[in-house]
Amino acid sequence: MSYIDIVINEQDFLTIAYGNCWGRLSNLEVWFQRPKDIVPKLVSGDLDLGIVGLDTVSEYGQIPKYGIFENVNSMKELAQMPQWTPEKPLRVATGFTYLGPKFMKENGVKHVTFSTADGALEAAPEMGIAEAIVDLVSSGTTLRENNLKEIEGGVILQSQAVLVANRKSLTQRKGVLDITHEILERLEAHLRAIGQFTVTANMRGSSQEEVAERILSQTSLSGLQGPTISPMFCKRDGRVAADYYAIVICAPKKLLYKSVHQLRAEALKKRHDDSLEPGAIPLTQE
């Protein structure tokens, strides 16, 4: 169960808490703090509400959200901060003990030390064991929740899943190279298929070529390399006939609805044209 945290000045507690106004509120947790500690905890997000004197709010309420990094928004500004000296270097917590130091050196941050840590790095600055972190970031939500921010030029690399191999195994172990080729082909096929949908429809026609001509006249129905058209056989009047054809096309997601609409329109047009008496005006599709 989650609770709303509220802090109260001990002096205010004498006049408020004894009135039992909190006892009737559910999901409420009350903390008693010194006046000057209440506002910083509200600013940091550790607490939700506070009751304190206006003088204290006016005095301590302008605490920068990011402390000494409030106006630091780029790697260049970080490197130029006068706070970092050989005696008091910038402390960085990270699990990337090779990439982190290399990146800092390349960006001119001279006075910096690194501490190794795994997991929950975002808590390191709040705990006082580091001023900055180098970590893997996805949405940035965890950073914001801990009053941390990314700075311009601070992206070390854009990470993604990669297939890696042992060079010796590829060249010396029998079958490894063939399996690797098979894996790469399947991965490539999967990546190419992302966003593509298979559309299947049945359409009346006199031949595969005639159906293909009608399908290819619509640009959204051409698929990746063209439609797959197969005859559908049925038995009519004692003999096998193929009056309908199965059509399979690949359509990108953004053209899916348009492709289905055009397939239906072509099928209806063909059905209408076949039902016309000789000399009648055929239905045209815009």
Image (cartoon, rainbow, N blue to C red):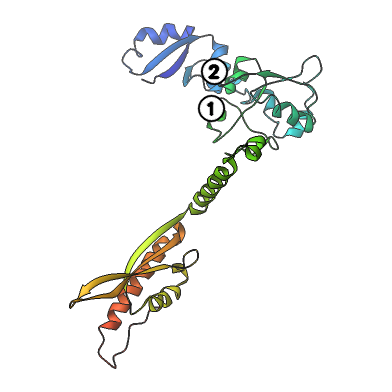
SS label for mark 2: helix
Q: Are marks 2 and 1 in contact (CB under 8 Å)?
A: no
Q: Position of residue 243 (x, y in %)?
A: 28, 76
Q: Position of residue 61 (x, y in %)?
A: 59, 22
Point out which mark residue 41 bears: 2
Residue displayed at 30% across by 69% down: 232
| Quadrant of the frame with the N terminus | top left
The tally of labels here is 2
Image-based side of 90 in relation to 124, left or right: right
Q: Position of residue 268 (x, y in %)?
A: 30, 75
Point out which mark residue 145 bears: 1
Q: Nearer the viewer, mark 2 or mark 1?
A: 1
Splitting the image into 4 quarters, where does residue 97 fall?
top right
Is residue 93 positioned above or below 269 on the image? above
Q: Position of residue 274 (x, y in %)?
A: 28, 82
Residue displayed at 51% across by 52% down: 189
Amino acid on which disc 2 is placed? Lys
Point out which mark residue 276 bears: none
Amino acid on which disc 1 is placed? Glu
Mark earlier in primary sequence (2, 1): 2
Task: Using the image as rendered, state which of residue 278 and residue 180 is in the foreground.
Answer: 180
Image-based side of 27 in relation to 126, left or right: left
Number of other residues with Cα within 10 Å of mark 2, as a class: few under 14, some 14 to 19, many 20 or more:
some
CA gap, disc 2 and disc 1: 13 Å
Number of other residues with Cα within 10 Å of mark 1, as a class: few under 14, some 14 to 19, many 20 or more:
few
Splitting the image into 4 quarters, where does residue 258 fall?
bottom left
Task: Using the image as rendered, state which of residue 71 and residue 253 is in the foreground.
Answer: 253
Task: Using the image as rendered, state which of residue 140 and residue 40 is in the foreground.
Answer: 140
| Quadrant of the frame with the C terminus | bottom left
Image-based side of 4 in relation to 57, left or right: left
Image-based side of 79 in relation to 126, left or right: right
Is residue 32 positioned above or below 99 on the image? above
